[in-house]
Amino acid sequence: MTAAAVSEPNPVRKLRTLFISDLHLGSKAARTDYLLDFLRHHEAETIILVGDIVDGWRLKRSWYWPQQCNDVIQKLLRKARKGTRIIYVPGNHDEFLRDFPGMHFGGIEVAQRHVHRGADGRNYLVLHGDEFDVVVRNARVLAYLGDWAYDMAIAVNIGLAAIRRRLGMPYWSFSSWAKLQVKHAVNFIGEFQKVVAEEARRHQAQGVICGHIHHAVIEDIGGIRYINTGDWVESCTAIAEHHDGTMELITWHSLRGSATVAEDASEAGLPVSVPAQQAA
């Protein structure tokens, strides 16, 4: 483990690659505020969008597209114009884009899958991961019902977050906590990770980077580096590749929360101390 810290009020981190997924733009639960802040503080040579960027399922049910969703899209397009390579690997919620492999939209490339060559020489298979979710593949009605139940948990999340914010308490995800209390969900995550890691092995890759299950982690599974980017609904996480090939899991609401405290203290003339964010 190495450490990365916010050492100044408004740092802009220069990275080789950023991997983000499950933004769910078009959902009321999308944390576009945290995401825009994150994008302002990170620059990368390549950004890989690992699916479920736009939530087509929810937009079909009811249209919801506030200005901040436009701001996120514009921010990404602006980065593309400035020379950042952006690759979009669609997921199940934005599966309509799977009909356009190889196409470019405003400088953003669409790919069914992508093989990322790390700075350390490893090949990483990049995919969203929904193709390994039996419910999504074979029981679409159950998938929609599960999506509705997830919406309910997120609604609870939003209410609790507002209360905790008024009380000066840090961000905490009820929906993420509840999901991990269910034995079947924990078992599903474990099986999902094994199957996805095996898919990387089948493609002679040394690692795999995916999203879909909203469970951010970096770990080795049977000699394969398994990386899940998490999401921007509950955990507000991303994966950063440094120029030496080191992969870091960033939890932005924790890191940025500390930075915000530091900025407020600095403006007030108080001493600043920001805890380090652990990286894998």
Image (tube, rainbow, N blue to C red):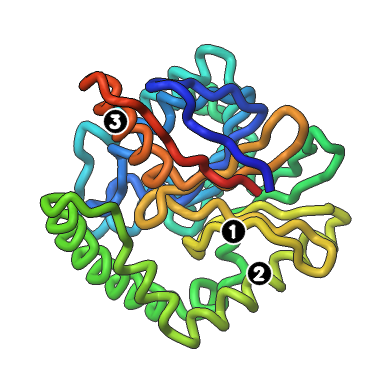
**In the picture provided, is 113 more to the left or to the right than 145?**
right
Residue pointed to by mark 1: 217
| Residue 221 shown left or right of residue 252 in the figure | right
Residue 189 higher or lower than 63, as above or below: below
**Quadrant in the picture for residue 219:** bottom right
Give the image location of residue 96, x and y in percent.
Answer: 46, 50
Residue 183, given in percent of the width and then of the height, sits at 48, 87
Task: Return the residue at label 3.
Answer: 70
> Which amino acid does the dot numbered 3 rest on?
Asn
For the residues bearing labels 2 and 1, Cβ distance under 8 angstroms:
yes
Q: Residue furthest top?
A: 82
Q: Nearer the viewer, mark 3 or mark 2?
A: 2
Q: Between tags 1 and 3, which lies in front?
A: 1
* Position of 26 relative to 220 (above/below): above
Q: Position of residue 56 (x, y in %)?
A: 36, 52
Residue at screen point 76% across, 48% down: 124
Q: Is residue 99 visible?
A: no
The tag earlier along the polypeptide, 2 or 1, is 2
Residue 223 position (above or below residue 113): below
Q: How many marks?
A: 3
Compare marks 3 and 2 and give the one earlier in the sequence.
3
How far apart marks 2 and 1 lie (CA) works out to 10 Å
Mark 3 secondary-structure assignment: helix
- Residue ID for mark 2: 193
Q: Residue at x 36, y 28 (%)?
A: 272
Nearer the observer: mark 2 or 1; the answer is 1
Is 13 positioned to the left or the right of 243 in the image?
left
Dot 1 or dot 3, earlier in sequence: 3
Amino acid on which the number 2 mark rests in the picture: Gln
Report, in whole angstroms, how far the alpha carbon at label 3 lies from the one at label 2: 33 Å
| Amino acid type at mark 1 | Val
Residues under numbered marks 3 and 2 in contact, where contact means CB atoms less than 8 Å apart: no
